[in-house]
Image: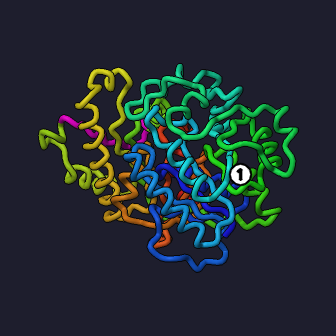
Amino acid sequence: MILGCIADDFTGASDAASFLVKGGMRTLLFNGIPENDINDTDTDAIVIALKTRTQETTSAVADSLAAIDWLEKQGAKHFYVKYCSTFDSTPKGNIGPICDAVMDALQVENTLLCPSLPVNGRTVKDAVLYVHGIKLEESHMRNHPLTPMRDSNLIRLMAPQSRYESRHLSWGDIELVEHGRLKGRGYFIPDYESDEDGEKIIAAFGAMKLLTGGSGILTAWADYLLQQKNYDRKALRGSEGRGVLLAGSCSKATLQQIAWFQERGGLSYKLYPDKILKKEQGLDDIRQFLRAHKDRDVLIYSSETPQYLEEIRGETLLTYSLLIENMLAAAAVIAKEEGVRHIIVAGGETSGAVTKALGYQAYWIGQSIAPGVPIMAPLENPEMRIVLKSGNFGQEEFFGRALTMTGEV
């Protein structure tokens, strides 16, 4: 094994794994730290999905260090700390403490902060993070219910979190670097506005033991570390069977994807938190819906508009969110019991709940439906195909593409 990666949640992990596959690495994704060592000598990279994005900081650091230790024992020589490309971390967030601890554990003096993902509009210039050309603090992430982002400057964002200094690294500075070495303790933030910038960063710093950031730079790093080694990335495609779409995200992208599916005659069933609380809607209704349309791909969703979310902001929103996560996770289990072979999930928290409920621990990673959203096959159930996407990811026709590609054999 060459590269070990830890990610702050499951969708972030599958995102990272898909970019490693694109770079040519044969990649395994684990849901949590494996209990045993691995014996698969064909594995180039392992990604471990943790739950550190909103976890209590002490536990998040401990889990991260345990994962790094396990990866090091499996033979990894290079390490990546993957966090969201919109740097979902408040002043008391976990990115700084985790990166500090990993840097200390691996005994490296410095590393890079590279949250950019240009293919999805996340870019960095002069240490400022942009979303589709808009400063992070002015984007939709400003009012995220769990990690509201009120600043765009990565140096200021890291200052209250980290024990080490963060500095902007201009292209002029990069040209002065030799043999991938940087002088000084702490974090360096390079300008990263395009995939070409990512390739230049890796050309300069690909030999480093530790890098951190979003998934964007991983394709170039995989290619650099493999030195042209490759394998057939089309080997893992689809399988026969029907599919179910599970949508808990309320992002603009997911709302558009739901509308696209419905406008084309797609069958859907909506969950309402107030009805669930009143016992007017439950798991039996979901099972009946799936059985009534056993020959069709269907959508089960709870997504609501920003206006509705604003009306219930606060304790009610958190209660409803947890309720819906649990219902959609249970729906995934019911779908599996009813013979569904393709499960496509929209939403980071929803994806985490679904993967926990299904209980699979390891996945081979296949081709991507959209940047950062791969098809996955559980080692424990090779005929099952699972797709997990962050709410903001994917094009308008994403659901249609996912159902088609998971069914291609």
Quarter where residue 197 is shown: top right
Is residue 218 visible in this depiction of the protein?
yes
The type of residue carrying mark 1 is: Thr
Residue 379 lies within the magenta run: no
In this orientation, which residue lies closer to the viewer: 305 or 150?
150
Q: What element carries label 1?
A: helix
Residue drawn at point x = 54 percent, y = 65 percent = 69
Quadrant position of the N terminus in the picture: bottom right
Query: Which residues are the magenta region?
Result: 262-274
What residue do we see at 59% from left, 64% from top? 46
State whether residue 409 appears in this view. no
Kindly identify the residue that appears in the image at 53 percent across and 42 percent down: 96
Task: Describe residue 177's horizontal placement relative to residue 383 as left or right.
Answer: right
Q: Name the residue under label 1.
A: 219
Residue 112 in percent (x, y) is at 68, 43
Q: How is the image coloured?
A: rainbow
Q: Compared with residue 379, is residue 328 higher up or lower down, i.e. above or below? A: above
Q: In this view, does 29 lie to the left or right of 197?
A: left
